[in-house]
Image: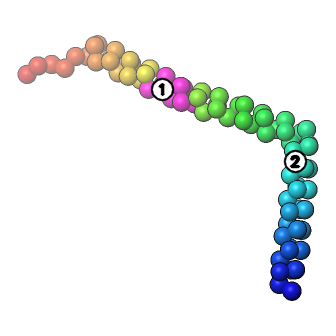
Amino acid sequence: MKSEILMVSNTSFLLIKNTILNMTINNPIFIFAVITVIWFIPGIIVRSYKESKQIKKKEKAQSEAIQKLYPKQKD
C-alpha cells in the first residue's frame, strides 16, 4: 500500500516537473529573458568594477597633485 502511494506520488511529481520544464524551455519569451540576463550581468559587474577602480585612481592622482602643490615643511 505504501509503495503504491509512493509510486503515485513519485509519478505525479515527475509529471509536474516535466510539465513545468516543458513550459519554460519551450517558451521563447522565457528563453529570451534568460539569455538576456546571462548576457548582461557579467558586463554590469565588470563595468561597476572598472568604474570604482577608475574613481580610486582619479582620487589618488588628485591627492598626489595636491601634495605637490602643498609639500610638507621640514622642521
Residue 49 image-quadrant placement = top right
Cα separation between marks 1 and 2: 39 Å
Q: Position of residue 34 (x, y in %)?
A: 79, 39
The residue labelled by disc 2 is 24
Say whether disc 1 or disc 2 marks the residue closer to the N-terminus. 2
**Could you tell me the amino acid type at mark 2?**
Thr
Amino acid type, label 1: Lys
Of the 4 image quadrants, the one containing the C terminus is: top left
Q: Secondary structure at mark 1?
A: helix
Quadrant assignment, res 3 = bottom right
Q: Which residues are magenta?
A: 48-56
Which element is circle 2 on?
A: helix
Q: Residue at x 51, y 29 (%)?
A: 52
Up-down relation of residue 74 to residue 39 (above or below): above
Residue under numbered circle 1: 53
29 or 61, which is in the foreground?
29
27 is within the stretch colored magenta = no
Q: How busy is the neighbourhood of tag 2: few (under 14 within 10 Å), some, or many (20 plus)?
A: few
Q: Tell me residue 65's x, y (percent).
A: 34, 15
Is 14 positioned to the left or the right of 69 in the image? right
